[in-house]
Image (spheres, coloured by chain):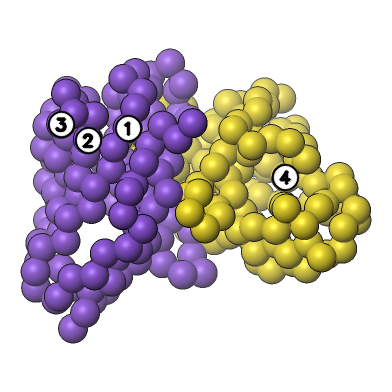
Chain colours: A yellow, B purple
Amino acid sequence: EAQVTQNPRYLITVTGKKLTVTCSQNMNHEYMSWYRQDPGLGLRQIYYSMNVEVTDKGDVPEGYKVSRKEKRNFPLILESPSPNQTSLYFCASSLRYSNYGYTFGSGTRLTVV
Amino acid sequence: DQQVKQNSPSLSVQEGRISILNCDYTNSMFDYFLWYKKYPAEGPTFLISISSIKDKNEDGRFTVFLNKSAKHLSLHIVPSQPGDSAVYFCAASDETSGSRLTFGEGTQLTVNP
């Protein structure tokens, strides 16, 4: 089944403790992206990657890192999480140019205390 | 600067009636528009799209209208069904940004039986 898989689905952590949210897609998509969803703000892009070893900042990149060493994987790294990074995170992937936009993962609910 | 805006956070309609969800954009470079639907605890899923060379696209009960001069698009659902209750996101892209999508804040649609 074609899908984007994120792990974990839920995570509660403490301020400053480094964490990684994994994302993997099995559709051979070139493009991958991370979004966060917050009430009243919709989906805001954190980072995106046009292909392997090519990453770029989205609209809200502060406090996050990403890497794209393989085409299928695009992990999101929070080196020193803070409470304002408490959010619902989505990974997405697509072909380079697609009429159907993204395929999204199921989301990761992160709480930083 | 919110380039894609959905001014109605919520909409409630009766089953069988028409649902109209609205979206406005400010970036005149946007040339492709999409609607996504999101259920709780799931990632957004693609619903319907429209290119800027068209003013209407229809897929079953869903129709998207684009008014380029007003920088406005709308999603019509006829007839509305209780299973349509979800958050709907409007998104836009331009050819210079490739696969990158800019999303609106979302509208929670509730269809009452």
Badge 1 and badge 2 in a common chain = yes
| Disc 1: host chain | B
- The amino acid pointed to by label 3 is Asn
Badge 1 and badge 4 in a common chain = no
Name the residue that disc number 4 marks: A75
Disc 1 and disc 2 in contact, CB within 8 angstroms: yes
Disc 3 and disc 2 in contact, CB within 8 angstroms: yes
Q: Position of residue A34 (x, y in %)?
A: 61, 43
For marks 3 and 2, the one nearer the N-term is 3
Q: Position of residue A14 (x, y in %)?
A: 87, 63
For marks 1 and 2, the one nearer the N-term is 1
Q: Which mark is residue B53?
A: none
Residue occupying the point 9% across, 73% down: B16
- The amino acid pointed to by label 1 is Tyr
Residue occupying the point 14% across, 40% down: B65
Q: CA distance from mark 1 to mark 2?
A: 6 Å
Q: Quadrant of residue B81?
A: bottom left
> SS of the residue at dot 2?
strand
Disc 4 and disc 3 in contact, CB within 8 angstroms: no
Q: Is residue A51 left or right of residue B99?
A: right
